[in-house]
Image (cartoon, grey):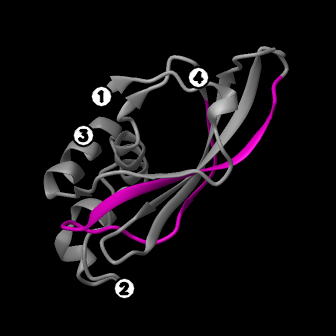
Protein backbone atom coordinates (compact mmCIF):
# COMPACT_ATOMS: atom_id res chain seq x y z
CA UNK A 1 0.00 0.00 0.00
CA UNK A 2 1.34 3.44 -0.88
CA UNK A 3 0.28 7.08 -1.39
CA UNK A 4 -0.15 8.46 -4.92
CA UNK A 5 -1.73 11.85 -5.63
CA UNK A 6 -4.12 11.58 -8.57
CA UNK A 7 -6.06 14.74 -9.35
CA UNK A 8 -9.36 15.02 -11.22
CA UNK A 9 -7.58 15.99 -14.45
CA UNK A 10 -5.40 12.85 -14.24
CA UNK A 11 -8.34 10.44 -14.49
CA UNK A 12 -8.98 9.27 -18.06
CA UNK A 13 -12.29 7.78 -19.20
CA UNK A 14 -12.06 4.03 -19.88
CA UNK A 15 -8.72 3.81 -18.04
CA UNK A 16 -8.62 0.39 -16.40
CA UNK A 17 -6.73 -1.38 -13.64
CA UNK A 18 -6.83 -5.00 -12.52
CA UNK A 19 -6.11 -6.29 -9.02
CA UNK A 20 -4.44 -9.44 -7.82
CA UNK A 21 -6.63 -12.42 -7.01
CA UNK A 22 -7.89 -13.75 -3.69
CA UNK A 23 -9.21 -17.27 -3.01
CA UNK A 24 -12.34 -17.42 -0.87
CA UNK A 25 -12.07 -19.82 2.08
CA UNK A 26 -14.39 -21.44 4.59
CA UNK A 27 -12.74 -19.25 7.22
CA UNK A 28 -13.91 -16.19 5.28
CA UNK A 29 -17.50 -17.48 5.54
CA UNK A 30 -17.24 -18.05 9.30
CA UNK A 31 -15.52 -14.74 10.06
CA UNK A 32 -17.97 -12.74 7.92
CA UNK A 33 -20.96 -14.47 9.54
CA UNK A 34 -19.52 -13.61 12.95
CA UNK A 35 -18.94 -9.98 12.00
CA UNK A 36 -22.39 -9.46 10.50
CA UNK A 37 -24.61 -11.92 12.36
CA UNK A 38 -25.66 -13.43 9.00
CA UNK A 39 -25.70 -17.15 9.77
CA UNK A 40 -28.30 -17.98 7.11
CA UNK A 41 -28.11 -21.63 6.06
CA UNK A 42 -27.26 -20.58 2.48
CA UNK A 43 -23.81 -19.65 3.81
CA UNK A 44 -23.31 -21.93 6.79
CA UNK A 45 -25.17 -25.27 6.40
CA UNK A 46 -23.45 -27.58 3.91
CA UNK A 47 -26.01 -30.38 4.39
CA UNK A 48 -29.01 -28.13 3.74
CA UNK A 49 -27.26 -26.50 0.78
CA UNK A 50 -26.72 -29.95 -0.76
CA UNK A 51 -30.52 -30.07 -1.21
CA UNK A 52 -30.63 -26.66 -2.91
CA UNK A 53 -30.06 -25.71 -6.57
CA UNK A 54 -26.37 -24.72 -6.19
CA UNK A 55 -25.60 -27.88 -4.13
CA UNK A 56 -23.07 -26.02 -1.96
CA UNK A 57 -22.72 -23.02 0.33
CA UNK A 58 -22.90 -19.58 -1.31
CA UNK A 59 -20.66 -16.73 -0.19
CA UNK A 60 -22.33 -13.74 1.45
CA UNK A 61 -22.74 -11.05 -1.22
CA UNK A 62 -21.63 -8.44 1.29
CA UNK A 63 -18.45 -10.42 1.92
CA UNK A 64 -17.61 -10.59 -1.78
CA UNK A 65 -18.26 -6.85 -2.04
CA UNK A 66 -15.97 -6.18 0.96
CA UNK A 67 -13.15 -8.43 -0.23
CA UNK A 68 -13.43 -7.29 -3.86
CA UNK A 69 -13.32 -3.62 -2.88
CA UNK A 70 -10.50 -4.34 -0.43
CA UNK A 71 -8.48 -5.73 -3.33
CA UNK A 72 -8.72 -2.31 -5.02
CA UNK A 73 -7.18 -0.52 -2.03
CA UNK A 74 -3.55 -0.93 -3.02
CA UNK A 75 -2.94 2.80 -3.42
CA UNK A 76 -4.12 5.66 -1.25
CA UNK A 77 -5.08 8.84 -3.13
CA UNK A 78 -5.01 11.78 -0.69
CA UNK A 79 -6.74 13.94 -3.35
CA UNK A 80 -9.92 11.79 -3.47
CA UNK A 81 -12.74 10.96 -1.09
CA UNK A 82 -15.24 8.16 -1.50
CA UNK A 83 -18.89 9.24 -1.67
CA UNK A 84 -20.06 5.65 -1.63
CA UNK A 85 -21.28 2.99 -4.02
CA UNK A 86 -24.22 2.80 -6.43
CA UNK A 87 -25.84 0.11 -8.55
CA UNK A 88 -24.52 -2.80 -6.48
CA UNK A 89 -25.59 -6.16 -7.92
CA UNK A 90 -24.77 -9.74 -7.00
CA UNK A 91 -24.58 -11.28 -10.48
CA UNK A 92 -23.44 -14.87 -9.83
CA UNK A 93 -22.79 -16.93 -6.71
CA UNK A 94 -19.29 -17.37 -5.29
CA UNK A 95 -18.30 -20.61 -3.57
CA UNK A 96 -15.56 -21.78 -1.21
CA UNK A 97 -12.42 -22.25 -3.29
CA UNK A 98 -13.32 -19.65 -5.93
CA UNK A 99 -10.70 -17.03 -6.68
CA UNK A 100 -11.86 -13.49 -7.36
CA UNK A 101 -10.16 -10.35 -8.61
CA UNK A 102 -11.43 -6.84 -9.34
CA UNK A 103 -11.35 -4.81 -12.53
CA UNK A 104 -11.91 -1.07 -12.22
CA UNK A 105 -12.55 1.31 -15.10
CA UNK A 106 -13.21 5.04 -15.10
CA UNK A 107 -16.74 5.30 -16.49
CA UNK A 108 -17.73 8.93 -15.80
CA UNK A 109 -16.28 12.32 -14.88
CA UNK A 110 -18.22 15.44 -14.02
CA UNK A 111 -18.50 18.65 -12.09
CA UNK A 112 -18.96 18.88 -8.35
CA UNK A 113 -20.93 21.38 -6.27
CA UNK A 114 -17.60 22.90 -5.24
CA UNK A 115 -15.49 24.21 -8.15
CA UNK A 116 -12.23 22.96 -6.67
CA UNK A 117 -13.46 19.35 -6.98
CA UNK A 118 -14.78 17.06 -9.70
CA UNK A 119 -16.64 13.76 -9.56
CA UNK A 120 -15.28 10.47 -10.85
CA UNK A 121 -17.16 7.19 -11.18
CA UNK A 122 -15.19 3.96 -11.11
CA UNK A 123 -17.11 0.99 -12.50
CA UNK A 124 -16.05 -2.07 -10.50
CA UNK A 125 -16.45 -5.65 -11.69
CA UNK A 126 -15.51 -8.55 -9.44
CA UNK A 127 -14.63 -11.58 -11.54
CA UNK A 128 -14.12 -15.25 -10.67
CA UNK A 129 -11.48 -17.68 -11.92
CA UNK A 130 -13.68 -18.60 -14.90
CA UNK A 131 -13.76 -14.99 -16.14
CA UNK A 132 -17.38 -14.57 -15.02
CA UNK A 133 -18.56 -11.32 -13.45
CA UNK A 134 -19.94 -12.14 -9.99
CA UNK A 135 -20.57 -8.61 -8.66
CA UNK A 136 -20.77 -5.12 -10.13
CA UNK A 137 -21.03 -1.66 -8.63
CA UNK A 138 -20.08 1.95 -9.23
CA UNK A 139 -17.69 3.68 -6.83
CA UNK A 140 -18.37 7.42 -6.57
CA UNK A 141 -15.45 9.72 -5.83
CA UNK A 142 -15.01 13.43 -5.18
CA UNK A 143 -11.55 14.40 -6.44
CA UNK A 144 -9.55 17.61 -5.98
CA UNK A 145 -8.72 19.54 -9.15
CA UNK A 146 -5.22 20.83 -9.92
CA UNK A 147 -6.72 23.97 -11.44
CA UNK A 148 -10.03 25.57 -10.46
Q: N-terminal of the two: label 2 or label 3? A: 3
Residues shaded magenta: 83-112
Question: 112 and 3: which one is in front?
Answer: 3
For the residue pair 128 and 143, the one nearer the viewer reads as 143
Most foreground residue, 28 or 131: 131
Counting from the top left corner in percent of width and height, residue 4 is at: 44, 24
State the residue position of label 3: 34
What residue sits 71% from the left and 19% below the top? 145
**Separation of residues labelled 3 and 1 (CA atoms):** 27 Å
User: Is 100 covered by the magenta stretch?
Assistant: yes
How far apart in space, not on screen, are marks 4 and 1 (Cα)? 17 Å
Category of crowding for the residue at label 1, using alpha-carbon neighbours closer than 10 angstroms: few (below 14), some (14–19), many (at least 20): few
Q: Left or right of 129: which side holds 78?
A: right
Report x, y in % for residue 91.
Answer: 51, 69
| Residue at image mark 2 | 53
N-terminal of the two: label 4 or label 2? 2
Q: Are marks 4 and 1 in contact (CB under 8 Å)?
A: no
Image quarter (top left, top right, bottom left or bottom right) of the N terminus: top left
Please tell me the numbered disc located at residue 1.
1
| Classed neighbour count for the residue bearing mark 2: other residues with Cα under 10 Å, few (<14), some (14–19), many (≥20) | few
The residue carrying pointer 4 sits among few (fewer than 14), some (14 to 19) or many (20 or more) residues within 10 Å by Cα, namely few
Q: Earlier in the sequence, mark 2 or mark 1?
A: 1
Label 2 close to label 1 by CB (< 8 Å): no
Amino acid sequence: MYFKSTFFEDYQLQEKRVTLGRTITETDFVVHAGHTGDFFPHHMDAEWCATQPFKQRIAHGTMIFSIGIGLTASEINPEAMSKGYDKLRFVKPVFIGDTIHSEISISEKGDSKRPEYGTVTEHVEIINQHGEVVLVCDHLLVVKKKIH
